[in-house]
Amino acid sequence: MMLIPFLLIGYLVYIGINRKHSVGVNENQLVERSKPLEIAKVRLAKGELSLEEFEQIKKNLLEE
């Protein structure tokens, strides 16, 4: 009789852990998409890109 509550609690913990990990994947994907834009911002600040080049890169990245 006591086995059923333990199994239920274990299952709920398992689901909670898996949901936490699946959310992390989405956050990582978001970080990966913003990384090229951050690089372009740094290059603009260093003077490696003109403002026009930066705006074109930004436009291309945000279209994806």
Image (tube, grey):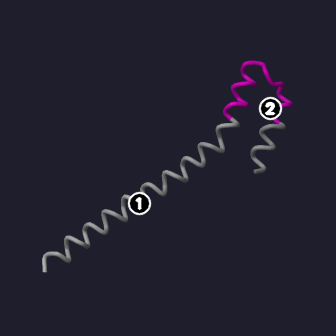
Q: How far across and how far down the image is residue 15, in percent?
A: 37, 65
The answer to which image quadrant residue 48 occupies is top right
Q: Residue 18 has which mark? A: 1
In the visual, does 45 lie left or right of 53? Answer: left
Residue at 36 percent across and 61 percent down: it is: 16
Q: Which quarter of the image is occupied by the N terminus? A: bottom left
Q: Residue 29 has which mark? A: none
Q: Secondary structure at mark 1?
A: helix
In the visual, does 4 lie left or right of 57? Answer: left
In the rendered view, tell whether residue 18 sits above or below residue 39: below
Closer mark to the observer between disc 1 and disc 2: 1
Answer with mark 1 or mark 2, whichever residue precedes in sequence: 1
The answer to which image quadrant residue 40 occupies is top right
Estimate how packed mark 1 is, as few (under 14), some (14 to 19) or many (20 or more) residues with alpha carbons within 10 Å.
few
Residue interval drawn in magenta: 38-55
Cα gap from disc 1 to disc 2, whole angstroms: 39 Å
Q: Which residue is mark 2?
A: 54
Tell me which secondary structure the magenta stretch mostly adopts.
helix
Farthest top residue in view: 46
In the rendered view, tell whether residue 48 sits above or below residue 25: above
